[in-house]
């Protein structure tokens, strides 16, 4: 399957206390990374308290996904909001570590850890 045939990942938005969670299931590549970026930017522009991007069920994460997270991080910083927290699968963590994005975005192994960190941000 090439990038043009790649299915759109499932994006599910949930709320938890002061945080909004964007859960992604499926691959993130050039054909669909804009969906993730645009949805997260919409939520940030709507004034969410904290944003958690749950990529724990992502098995393939292309460089366009890394770029999308970078754009989300930059936009969030321009709004002077708490950091965007990322729950990363092994594949995502490997990509973010290789590009040093793990130094710019708080990475978590579980959603519970990310939500706990957003609670700490709110204090």
Image (cartoon, rainbow, N blue to C red):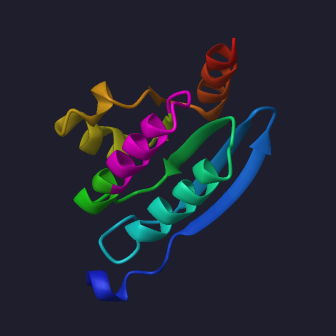
Please state which of residues 29 and 60 is positioned toward the viewer in this rendering: 29
Quadrant where the C terminus sits is: top right
Magenta extent: 68-83
Quadrant where the N terminus sits is: bottom left
Is residue 52 within the magenta segment? no
Question: Can you name the residue that lies furthest to the right here?
Answer: 17
Residue 1 visible in the picture:
no
**Residue 13 x, y percent position in the rendering:** 70, 56
Up/down of 31 relative to 33, above or below: below
**Residue 28 x, y percent position in the rendering:** 39, 64
Q: In screen coordinates, is 58 left or right of 64?
A: right
Seen at 56% across and 45% down, the residue is 54
Seen at 60% across and 64% down, the residue is 11
Please state which of residues 17 and 91 is positioned toward the viewer in this rendering: 17
Magenta-highlighted stretch: main secondary structure?
helix
**Residue 12 x, y percent position in the rendering:** 67, 61
Seen at 36% across and 56% down, the residue is 68
**Residue 53 x, y percent position in the rendering:** 54, 45
Seen at 44% across and 38% down, the residue is 78
Question: Can you name the residue that lies furthest to the bottom here?
Answer: 5
Up/down of 42 relative to 92, above or below: below
Please state which of residues 78 and 71 is positioned toward the viewer in this rendering: 78
Q: Tally the marks.
A: 0
Up/down of 21 relative to 63, above or below: above
Residue 41 visible in the picture:
yes
């Amino acid at each position: 399957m090439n990038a043009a045939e790649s299915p759109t990942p499932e994006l599910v938005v949930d709320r938890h206390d002061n945080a909004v969670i964007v859960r992604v299931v499926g691959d993130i590549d050039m054909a669909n990374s804009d969906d993730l970026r645009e949805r997260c930017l919409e939520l940030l522009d709507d004034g969410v308290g904290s944003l958690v991007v749950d990529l724990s069920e992502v098995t393939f994460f292309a460089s366009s996904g890394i770029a999308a997270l970078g754009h989300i991080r930059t936009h969030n910083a321009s709004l002077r909001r708490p950091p965007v927290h990322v729950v990363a699968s092994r594949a995502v963590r490997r990509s973010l570590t290789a590009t040093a994005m793990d130094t710019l975005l708080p990475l978590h192994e579980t959603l519970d850890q990310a939500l706990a960190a957003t609670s700490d941000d709110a204090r």
